[in-house]
Image (cartoon, rainbow, N blue to C red):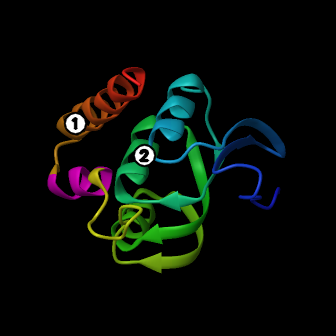
Amino acid sequence: MLIPDFTCYSLALLEGDSLIHSSQDGGLRPLWDALEKYSGKSGLILHDKVMGLAAARLIDRSGIIEEVHTTVVSLPAEQFLKDCGIRLTAFIVVPNILTHDKSSICPGELIALNTNEPDAFYKKIKSMLDAASDLLSLH
């Protein structure tokens, strides 16, 4: 098994011992894109630098990830992955994933905590990511 190297990527997907995808970008977008791109696969291992509840719920919905390795996991994400039977290795457990300035809980985590119904959650996350993409394309 490959040991996560978060100096080279913030997110990586492995199939067995082969690295099949990686990204240096932050936030939920790299995970969203990877889960979409490899949707036909199964039994993959995910290295993701930060794992919040939104990421955990997207992973479970995808059905392609069997194991997660992360530096930081939120308590709700840790419990959710455990309940789903997805193996987790994490170095640090925190109450919630915060924004970069640590002033509040990150938007994806808030959506995941406040939206129980899976399809509604998925649509809200997609809208959040689409809005962020639209914002970036304006610059």
Q: Label 2: which residue?
A: 60
- Residue 52 in percent (x, y) is at 41, 59
Where is the C terminus found, in terms of image quarters?
top left
Classify residue 87 as left or right of residue 115: right
Judging depth in this view, the residue of 72 and 69 nearest the camera is 72
Where is the N terminus found, in terms of image quarters?
bottom right
Bounds of the magenta segment: 108-114
Classify residue 136 as left or right of residue 124: right
Tell me the kind of residue under disc 2.
Asp
Tell me the kind of residue under disc 1.
Lys
Q: Does the magenta stretch include residue 20?
A: no
Q: Can residue 63 be seen in this view?
A: no
The secondary structure type at the circle numbered 2 is helix
Residue contact at pointers 2 and 1, CB within 8 angstroms: no
Q: Which quadrant of the figure has residue 105?
A: bottom left
In the rendered view, tell whether residue 77 sits above or below residue 36: below
Classify residue 54 as left or right of residue 90: left
